[in-house]
């Protein structure tokens, strides 16, 4: 049995379903991406999978245990989550925010132990933000902030790591960097990773499994090479694409085909 | 300076200021007393000025400290709760509710009555203030997804209703007006030991609870979902914090009337000096708020002695310009 | 409630000739030997105390206590709404007389500090004034001076009544109590009683509130023959009078048309004290000058 088993899940916000008929199975150490257009229910799904929504039915098993019978504290020991955006009202430093990842392992009134400090140092290095640790999170750029949030999730030291659109709000190169970090986590630390993403080309080299989500239902799931077909993409995104082989990675890559128009003029 | 040392230094400076303020509060008053009188009272048990030193000045300074600490702690909690540095103990309607309770009691002609050793007016203020916030909380729970904004706006609306009912009562019973004004402006004139005995345990209890949940409050800064995902039982934490902060504000209002700005500005001062970590913010805000209000009360009763200014005038004088500064700093 | 128990206990230990009386707010008060150090928390009480010949025993008054002039020499304990507890405490009073308008919290606090506090309410008539004076006499153990004072005041009162015996026409009066905003006195106020006793008709007498603000419509509709303005001094009076004359909407009101606008000294009429009889005489003369000329 996989580390995450989801059967017949539906979820919403009290007025109709946003996602339904969800069946997903993740093996330990797998890197999976949920792909779909805006409004397909990606964020809802990834939140529902960790028990963050109230209006949920179905079955979720983490490591064989029923998620809905676990306390928040127990879930936090199993799943860490990197949200899409985090605006911080108060001026916490990078170190303080990353240290919050350790709360679940500490006593209520305890400060940082030597072991905690060790973990924090490691994760800061791993996501390459050691030099920022005294800075206020509110003053960082989008890319830096995303990495701090990943570091915070890593400090939580869980077997599962969920991310909601880790490349959104980031420049092109930062998106790639984030996925490289995730790949290292998967291969070096054996983490099981589940991320939502809208940029298909970005995930193809890294994901071992792709789940297509359309209007709240899973349209197709499987390995990237099998999944990236013109039909699937036309079906999910309603867009005509070309699929070619990337010259460097030898992996499939999509490119949009613009619809013909007589008015459009191409300038050199 | 390292953050740890900075905190210790800050606490030491505060304690020194507090000690000096308490001493000044004992020495200065409408009746001229010399330091020698104070010395004799303390070390030779001289009874001449016992009532003035002990029952009037000391009692009053201690109550000011406790109320200042309660308001500042309540403010620190609510600013974290709403993730909004402009929140204060009175946004969710505690003060409007408590004023309404007090004026209701007056207009029913029960201004002088007492029960369980407390004036009925205090009990009314506390009861109505607390009930109003509970009602606001229940109303904002009716939606499927709990939104902090809903609570905030419901609180403001309920506060407005309570305020207008207060005005209505004052209009109907113009004879209770003079009694109400005295109370609405806030004052420690009536401090007595029973009130000190009533506020102190609440403050201690609330401070303990706040400290116990301080890490959870830190997590709220990342958003409710993130806090949950980091292991915090957010709904329970929020309920507890709301109850604690309301309790603190309602108790304060019921003994001293409405004193603005302390809960708003004190947590800011502390945050500027020791940072936003609630594990340190709660305790130090309480200490700072208490000290600040002892000083304000000292000013309130000495500036125009023997006339006493309502203490709200002094706190607003310090608070309002700082508030404007904050608004501009936040663009 | 605590006080009640406290005083009930106290009552059982008191000798019968001393006993318990209740003040105007139903708080029990243990009568004692003639108090020697009295603090007055209101100007009218200060006037009553001095009129009872107790001036020497008054040790503290409010900053508003300016009559009789000797009162100005006394220690000031603050104002009516903000008496200073420390000042009062330092005077070591053995009796504090308070009046309606003193914050109830302050009065309770003084009781908690074990001072005897006796609080009086504003009466609704001149008879109420006599009772107030008798009560003050009782707690200060100046029963006889109080009896004499009241007898003297009643005599003056009757003389005025006698002078007005043959009055045939009672003019309609608007009494402006603050000099602005058309504030006046309604049913149940002692000033309403005063207007009636002075041979007038209060145009706001039918309104069941002691103090109220009339609107212009009502004033024009009631069309008073006379306007009386209570003011601290002549200057404030002429300002207030001008506001009536200058308002074009009021030009058809009889009192304004005939310029029948008169001054009443606020310090005399506004205090529920012995000089109220002088205020009655003053108003009677304003309303019925012919009656007083005839007698002369």
Image: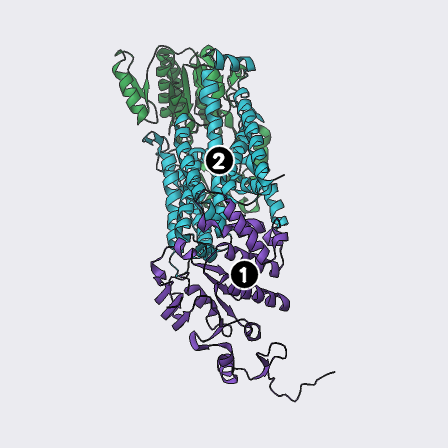
Tell me residue B208's x, y (percent).
Answer: 42, 38
| Image-quadrant location for residue A123 | bottom right
Of the pair A140 and B105, the residue shown nearer to us: A140
* Badge 2 and badge 1 in a common chain: no
Identify the image quadrant of the N terminus of chain A.
bottom left
Query: Real-space Cα distance between discs 2 and 1?
Result: 35 Å
Of the pair A205 and B68, the residue shown nearer to us: A205
Tell me residue C160's x, y (percent).
Answer: 41, 23
- Residue at disc 1, secondary structure: loop
At horizontal 59% and vertical 55% (from top left) the residue drawn is A125
Identify the image quadrant of the C terminus of chain A.
bottom right
Of the pair B37 and B259, the residue shown nearer to us: B37
Above or below B26: residue B324: below
Asked whether residue C176 is in view, the answer is no
What is the chain identity of the residue bearing mark 1?
Answer: A
Say which colour chain C has. Answer: green
Which chain is tinted cyan? B
Residue bearing mark 1: A85
Residue bearing mark 2: B69
What is the chain identity of the residue bearing mark 2?
Answer: B
Say which colour chain A has. Answer: purple
Q: How many marks can you see?
A: 2
Near mark 2 (Cα within 10 A), the count class, few <14, some 14-19 or many ≥20, is many
């Amino acid at each position: 049995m996989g580390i995450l088993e989801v059967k017949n899940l539906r979820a919403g916000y009290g007025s109709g379903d946003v996602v339904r008929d969800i069946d997903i199975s993740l093996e330990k150490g797998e890197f999976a991406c949920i792909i779909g257009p805006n409004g397909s229910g990606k964020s809802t799904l990834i939140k529902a999978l960790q028990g963050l929504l109230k209006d949920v039915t179905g079955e979720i098993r983490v490591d064989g245990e029923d998620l809905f019978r676990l306390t928040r504290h127990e879930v936090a020991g199993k799943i860490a989550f990197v949200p899409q955006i985090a605006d911080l009202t108060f001026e916490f430093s990078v170190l303080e925010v990353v240290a919050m990842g350790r709360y679940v392992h500490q006593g209520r009134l305890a400060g940082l132990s030597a072991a905690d400090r060790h973990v924090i140092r490691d994760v800061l290095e791993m996501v390459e933000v050691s030099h920022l640790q005294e800075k206020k999170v509110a003053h960082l750029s989008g890319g830096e902030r995303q990495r701090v949030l990943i570091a915070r999730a890593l400090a939580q030291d869980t077997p599962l790591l969920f991310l909601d659109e880790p490349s959104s709000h980031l420049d092109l190169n930062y998106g790639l960097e984030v996925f490289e970090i995730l790949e290292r986590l998967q291969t070096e630390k054996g983490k099981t990773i589940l991320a939502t993403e809208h940029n298909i080309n970005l995930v193809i080299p890294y994901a071992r499994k792709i789940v297509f989500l359309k209007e709240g239902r899973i349209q197709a799931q499987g390995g990237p090479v099998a999944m990236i077909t013109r039909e699937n993409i036309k079906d999910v995104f309603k867009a005509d694409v070309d699929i070619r082989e990337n010259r460097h990675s030898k992996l499939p890559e999509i490119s949009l085909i613009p619809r013909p128009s007589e008015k459009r003029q191409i300038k050199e | 300076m390292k953050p740890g040392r900075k905190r210790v230094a800050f606490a030491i400076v505060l304690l020194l200021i507090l000690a000096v303020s308490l001493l000044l509060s004992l020495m200065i008053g409408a009746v001229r007393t010399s330091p020698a009188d104070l010395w004799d009272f303390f070390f030779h048990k001289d009874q001449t000025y016992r009532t003035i030193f002990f029952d009037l000045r000391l009692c009053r300074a201690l109550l000011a400290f406790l109320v200042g600490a309660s308001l500042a702690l309540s403010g620190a909690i609510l600013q974290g709760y709403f993730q909004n540095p402009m929140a204060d103990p009175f946004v969710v309607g505690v003060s409007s509710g408590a004023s309404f309770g007090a004026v209701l009691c007056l207009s029913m002609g029960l201004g002088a009555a007492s029960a369980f050793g407390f004036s009925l007016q205090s009990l009314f203020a506390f009861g109505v203030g607390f009930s109003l916030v509970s009602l606001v909380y229940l109303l904002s729970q009716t939606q499927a997804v709990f939104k902090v904004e809903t609570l905030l706006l419901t609180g403001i609306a309920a506060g407005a209703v309570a305020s207008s009912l207060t005005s209505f009562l004052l209009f109907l019973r113009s004879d209770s007006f003079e009694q109400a004004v005295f109370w609405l402006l806030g004052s420690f004139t009536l401090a007595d030991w029973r009130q000190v005995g009533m506020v102190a345990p609440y403050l201690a209890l609330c401070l303990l609870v706040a400290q116990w949940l301080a890490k959870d409050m830190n997590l709220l800064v990342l958003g409710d979902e993130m806090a949950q995902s980091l292991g915090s039982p957010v709904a329970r934490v929020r309920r507890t914090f709301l109850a604690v902060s309301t309790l603190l504000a309602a108790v304060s209002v019921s003994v001293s009337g409405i004193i603005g700005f302390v809960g708003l500005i004190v947590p800011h001062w502390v945050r500027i000096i020791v940072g936003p970590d609630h594990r340190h913010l709660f305790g130090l805000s309480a200490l700072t708020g208490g000290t600040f209000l002892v000083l304000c009360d000292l000013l309130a009763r000495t500036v125009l002695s023997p006339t006493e200014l309502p203490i709200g005038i002094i706190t607003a004088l310090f608070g309002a310009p700082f508030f404007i500064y904050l608004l501009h700093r936040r663009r | 409630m605590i006080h009640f128990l406290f005083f009930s206990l106290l009552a059982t230990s008191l000798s019968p000739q001393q006993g318990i009386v209740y003040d105007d707010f139903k708080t029990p008060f243990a009568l004692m030997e003639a108090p020697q150090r009295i603090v007055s928390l209101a100007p009218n009480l200060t006037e009553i105390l001095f009129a009872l010949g107790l001036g020497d025993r008054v040790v503290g008054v409010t900053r508003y206590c300016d009559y009789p002039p000797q009162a100005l020499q006394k220690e000031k304990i603050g104002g009516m709404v903000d008496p200073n507890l420390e000042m009062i405490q330092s005077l070591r009073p053995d009796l504090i007389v308070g009046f309606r308008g003193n914050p109830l919290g302050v009065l309770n606090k003084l009781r908690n500090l074990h001072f005897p506090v006796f609080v009086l309410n504003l009466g609704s008539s001149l008879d109420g004034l006599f009772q107030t004076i008798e009560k003050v006499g009782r707690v200060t153990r100046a029963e006889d001076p109080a009896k004499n004072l009241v007898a003297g005041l009643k005599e003056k009162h009757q003389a005025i009544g006698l002078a007005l015996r043959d009055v045939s026409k009672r003019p309609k009066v608007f009494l402006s109590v603050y000099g602005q905003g058309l504030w006046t006195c309604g049913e149940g106020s002692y000033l309403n009683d005063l207007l009636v006793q002075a041979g007038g008709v209060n145009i706001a007498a039918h309104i069941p509130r002691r103090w109220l603000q009339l609107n212009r419509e009502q004033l024009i509709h009631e069309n008073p023959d006379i306007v009386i303005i209570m003011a601290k001094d002549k200057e404030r009076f002429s300002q207030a009078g001008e506001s009536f004359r200058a308002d074009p909407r009021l030009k058809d009101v009889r009192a304004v048309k005939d310029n029948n606008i008169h001054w009443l000294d606020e310090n005399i009429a506004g205090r529920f004290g012995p000089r109220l009889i002088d205020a009655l005489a003053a108003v009677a003369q304003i309303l019925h000058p012919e009656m007083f000329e005839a007698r002369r």
